[in-house]
Amino acid sequence: MKKICVMALMLLGIVCFNTSVNARARNIGVIGTGYVGLTVGACLAEFGHHVTCADIDATKIDMLNNGKIPIYEPGLEEMVTHWSTHSTLKFSSDPGSVIESADVVFIAVGTPMDEDGQADLRAIRAVAKTIGTHLNGYKLICTKSTVPIGTGSEIMSIIKKFAPAESEFDVVSNPEFLKEGTAISDFMQPDRVVIGCHTDRARKIIDEVYWPLHEHGVPFVYTDIITAETIKYACNAFLAVKISFINEMANLCDATLADVLGVVKGMGYDSRIGHKFLRPGPGYGGSCFPKDVQAILYKSRVANVDLKVISSAVKANELQKELVFKKFSKLLGDNLADKKIAVLGLAFKPNTDDIRYSPAITFITKALEAGAHIRAYDPIAIDSMRKEFPCIDYHSSLYDAVQGVDGIAILTEWDEFCTMDLAKVKDLVKTPILLDGRNILKVNELQELGFVYDNIGHAKV
Ligand code: UDX
């Protein structure tokens, strides 16, 4: 009897939970299926919403409908497959119809940087127009894409221009803080959610969209739209400044023979500083920091405000990428002509296939200019880099890449590089010269094996 009661209670609990989830389920459209759009779509499906991700790139949508995702993001393929088979996550190459059947529409298209540092808003404007022309009732439009400060009002104007007269809608700014390689956990356990909105109706709906995060006590920061847009840029610009700062401290340590890792340790315990984003390296890359710092600098020029700290951080970052190449070149006597060089790590960071603004691009460009022959390896990003440099040699393992080389440069801190068999590497290379661009290899082991090496900041790893 007791067992039957327990079973009944469990069944009731499941029904209530599902009912609760179903009662909260919203029809959500996500326009854009890149790193951000796919992560947002899959996670909102996990929240119990009925989500359709739309993209004008029919090839991408075909891939997604065949269970494949066009990007590498740990855990995303499994999540997309799971919710697709449960039909709460769908894909369409017709954004208009997705918008018509959605209560909430997330804008998650790219805003790449153009040549003068301005964000290219063509995709944003096109989506806003599509939303306006397909507005068939009240909808909440949620800008997830990183858009320049003040873009929210432009999105509203475009929608209004193309929507039927007297149409009702709200726009909110909901910037993403997703790091590539940890995007799912960054979405599911965020430090905070930033919502820029102007009406109670919009706030109520977006709160319902994010109901699990409210239930888990995640802090929500509510502001107006332009302030929310500014928070996003201020965060990325500050993090870029923090990275350039520690890279400059590393360069000072190289000159004074202080240990930069000791400096980081001593700094980081200060609760006002913290240890995160204080890892010296070859400079930051990726799809966000380089683009976002240029966008806020562009905006500041238009506003006639001089952001000296951020512009210095940008210059320091470009110099850092060049300095890492100079360090390596110095190890080889500043003569790279006809030398074989192994480049270990092509992605701008581990656990991604993304090479955008990767330090490896600067390094390979300069090494080729100096007449070197490159043997490149990366666990995931080879296909991405091959599009950039089709003529260099790519290898299927780090040990294959280091075979017979005059020197090795480590540019991405992939786990497998952190644990490489240095004795085996020593036997494979022509000359044991190594630049540890991410301070991942034990200095005493390199010394015992007779490597001629350098790292970033005289680091006592
Ligand atoms: C970044 C922001 O962190 C994220 O909030 C935003 O939404 C998107 O841009 P991402 O670019 O994916 O995320 O990666 P992140 O981990 O921030 O690293 C950015 C770059 O900084 C990488 O090139 C990384 O190697 C470099 N970095 C990071 C350092 O050199 N040192 C550090 O201590 C941390």
Image (cartoon, rainbow, N blue to C red):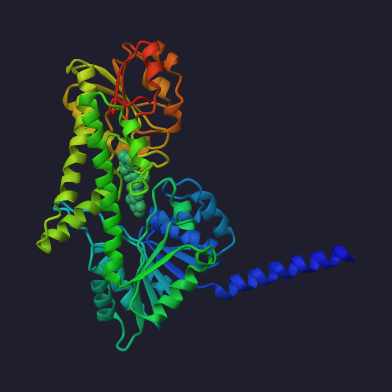
Q: Residue at x 33, y 78 (%)?
A: 198
Q: Residue at x 32, y 89 (%)?
A: 166
Q: 104 and 244: which one is in front?
A: 244
Answer with left or right where residue 438 lies relative to residue 121: right
Q: Give the number of callouts.
A: 0
Q: Position of residue 314 (x, y in %)?
A: 19, 45
Q: 236 and 354: which one is in front?
A: 236
Q: Position of residue 451 (x, y in %)?
A: 34, 14
Q: Give the residue furthest to the left.
A: 304
Q: Which corner quadrant of the image does residue 450 belong to?
A: top left
* Residue 459 in view: yes
Answer with left or right where residue 83 lies relative to residue 251: right
Q: 235 and 394: which one is in front?
A: 235
* Residue 461 position (above or below residue 265): above
The quarter of the rendered structure image containing the N terminus is: bottom right
* Residue 407 position (above or below residue 132): above
Q: Which corner quadrant of the image does residue 373 belong to?
A: top left
Taking the image in four quarters, ligand 1 sits in the one at top left
Q: Position of residue 94 (x, y in %)?
A: 40, 67
Q: Position of residue 349 (x, y in %)?
A: 36, 39
Q: Residue at x 19, y 29 (%)?
A: 366
